[in-house]
């Protein structure tokens, strides 16, 4: 394609890029994205218009080892449906305790609790709330509440006007009971919010629901509660979404669909979805979901016997995948590869293991963690921690040949542009600010851009004249990132010198 052909498209940006890269074009005019002061992560194509020599890359979390063993008499091999919540200086962990296999919603199921000051070192407090297995010296926060204890899933309610005695909420139940709502002032002492189930089976127009973990949260960007739960549709484990203004009255559930920028996405069984707002960008909901592969047997009968795995739980396998949503009825599954692969050793390849806990939480100045339930149906059952850099689910990545990422026209608020990035010693990131038509803005062109080299969570971008971009706030502009041997994880406009 020639530069003249590009120019006839009516976009100056297209012409400029085609001059540098023959054969490269932008089809049509990209819509404006109002980002304000929000942090945007490169986990989807929401703000991306053009990639050349740049690709979105999913990053594998680092295995940090076992953080909790399910080794008490009321816990056992069938512990699961974990939830991790950070509440100021305390991390709280909730999980089902179940020492032996049985039907969903049996009286043997309890909800257990552990806590941590940092998300790394965990302890099980002796709460004395319920007598289980002949003792009150246990960490059980809910018992004798079947079938709610099958999948009791708490949340910290961040709604601004939430009553103090309802600061924590939870959902639990099966298809027989419907979803039952609980509340708590402190996360350990729980009571029913209302006597009747808040979401009944009759209100869900899909077969077989609620037996998995039913996750809910207050959405600050939507101004309502959202709940994601599993159903079966045409024999495939799918996800539904419903919303509520008060945690009691819920909308008609909508079946979630999947998409990626290149086209359709194959349906896969997703056992748990673990959808929740990302704590550094709450308008973006991340989902570290359990992908279930029925009848995909890795462990032989003899190997299963040697492992001591329960005979019902080794003929399938599973791992964790990553996807995102911004509300509505779509997940973006930009990455079809696994996010957390099963580890070395056959104990990691049995049925219903590798199920992620709900919520990704910060565990250091530059680190966040996700937790995974492993060695299911085995005496070695435990919870494992995996770490990532902040915002580091994925990145826009270029190799040493260099590449360019151009955003759609955006409208921002703030004085400075900050980026989360990493380069090699030879690599760099430069940023050109352009008008919506793609023409460079004087003073912010690529020849004015100061080369950014290093590895930082928050780096203020600058040009020869400085870093102040407030004169462009509220105007439609494009960001043109010029990357060389670099990863770009996120960007944000801010009024602060350094974004905390």
Image (spheres, rainbow, N blue to C red):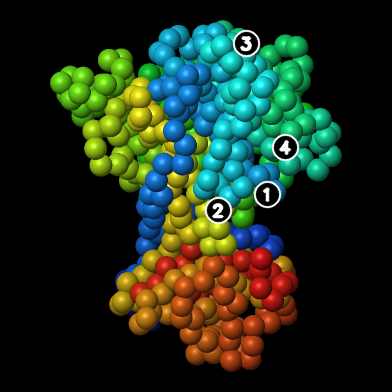
Which mark sits nearer the N-terminus, 2 or 3?
3
Which mark sits nearer the N-terminus, 2 or 4?
4
Mark pair 4, 3: CA separation: 25 Å
Which mark sits nearer the N-terminus, 4 or 3?
3
Callout 2–callout 3 Cβ contact below 8 Å: no
Which mark sits nearer the N-terminus, 3 or 1?
1
Which mark sits nearer the N-terminus, 4 or 1?
1
Report the residue at 48% width, 85% height from top: 451
Callout 4–callout 3 Cβ contact below 8 Å: no
* Secondary structure of the residue carrying numbered label 4: loop
* Secondary structure of the residue carrying numbered label 1: loop
| Residue 288 location (% of width, % of height) | 47, 41
Which mark sits nearer the N-terminus, 1 or 2?
1
Which is more toward the observer, 77 or 326?
77
Question: Where does label 1 land, which residue?
Answer: 89
User: Which mark's residue is nearer the viewer, 2 or 4?
Assistant: 2
| 199 w.r.t. 464: above or below | above
Callout 4–callout 1 Cβ contact below 8 Å: no
| Residue 329 location (% of width, % of height) | 56, 36
**What crowding class fits label 2: few (fewer than 14 Cα within 10 Å), some (14-19), or many (20 or more)?**
many
Question: Where does label 3 land, which residue?
Answer: 144
Name the disc covering residue 363, or none. Answer: 2
* Secondary structure of the residue carrying numbered label 2: strand
Report the residue at 51% width, 71% height from top: 456
| Residue 222 location (% of width, % of height) | 70, 42
């Amino acid at each position: 394609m020639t530069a003249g052909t590009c120019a006839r498209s009516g976009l100056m940006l297209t012409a400029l890029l085609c001059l540098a890269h023959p054969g490269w074009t932008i089809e049509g005019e990209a819509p404006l994205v109002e980002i304000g002061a929000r942090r945007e992560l490169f986990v989807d194509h929401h703000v991306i218009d053009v990639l050349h020599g740049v690709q979105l890359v999913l990053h594998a979390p680092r295995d940090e080892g076992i953080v909790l063993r399910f080794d008490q008499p009321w816990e056992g091999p069938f512990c699961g449906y974990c939830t991790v919540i950070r509440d100021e200086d305390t991390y709280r962990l909730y999980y089902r305790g179940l020492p032996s296999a049985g039907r969903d919603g049996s009286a043997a199921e309890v909800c257990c609790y552990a806590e941590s000051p940092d998300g790394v070192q965990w302890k099980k407090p002796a709460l004395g709330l319920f007598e289980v297995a002949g003792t009150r010296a246990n960490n059980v926060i809910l018992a004798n509440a079947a079938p709610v204890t099958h999948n009791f899933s708490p949340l910290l309610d961040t709604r601004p006007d939430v009553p103090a005695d309802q600061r924590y909420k939870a959902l639990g139940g099966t298809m027989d009971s419907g979803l039952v709502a609980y509340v708590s002032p402190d996360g350990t002492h729980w009571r029913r919010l209302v006597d009747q189930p808040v979401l009944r089976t009759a209100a869900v127009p899909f077969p077989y629901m609620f037996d998995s973990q039913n996750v809910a949260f207050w959405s600050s960007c939507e101004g309502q509660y959202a709940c994601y739960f599993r159903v079966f549709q045409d024999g495939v484990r799918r996800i539904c979404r419903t919303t509520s203004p008060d945690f009691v009255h819920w909308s008609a559930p909508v079946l979630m669909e999947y998409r990626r920028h290149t086209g359709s996405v194959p349906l896969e069984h997703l056992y748990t979805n673990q959808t929740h707002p990302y704590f550094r960008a709450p308008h973006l909901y991340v989902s570290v979901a359990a992908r279930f592969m029925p009848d995909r047997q890795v462990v032989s009968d003899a190997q299963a016997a040697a492992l001591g795995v329960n005979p019902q739980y080794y003929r399938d396998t599973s791992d964790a995948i990553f996807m995102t949503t911004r509300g509505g009825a779509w997940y973006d599954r930009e990455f079809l590869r696994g996010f957390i692969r099963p580890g070395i050793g056959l104990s990691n390849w049995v049925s219903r293991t590798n199920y992620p806990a709900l919520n990704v939480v910060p565990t250091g100045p530059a680190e966040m963690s996700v937790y995974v339930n492993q060695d299911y149906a085995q005496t070695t059952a435990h919870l494992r921690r995996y770490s990532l850099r902040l915002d580091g689910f994925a990145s826009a990545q270029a190799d040493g040949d260099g590449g360019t990422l151009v955003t759609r026209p955006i409208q921002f608020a703030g004085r400075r542009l900050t980026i989360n990035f990493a380069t090699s010693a030879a690599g760099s990131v430069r940023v050109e600010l352009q008008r919506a038509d793609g023409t460079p803005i004087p003073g912010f062109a690529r020849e004015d851009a100061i080369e950014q080299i290093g590895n930082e969570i928050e780096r203020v971008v600058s040009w020869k004249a400085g870093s102040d971009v407030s004169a462009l706030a509220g105007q439609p502009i494009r960001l043109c990132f010029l990357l060389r041997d670099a990863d770009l994880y996120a960007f944000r406009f801010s009024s602060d010198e350094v974004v905390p």
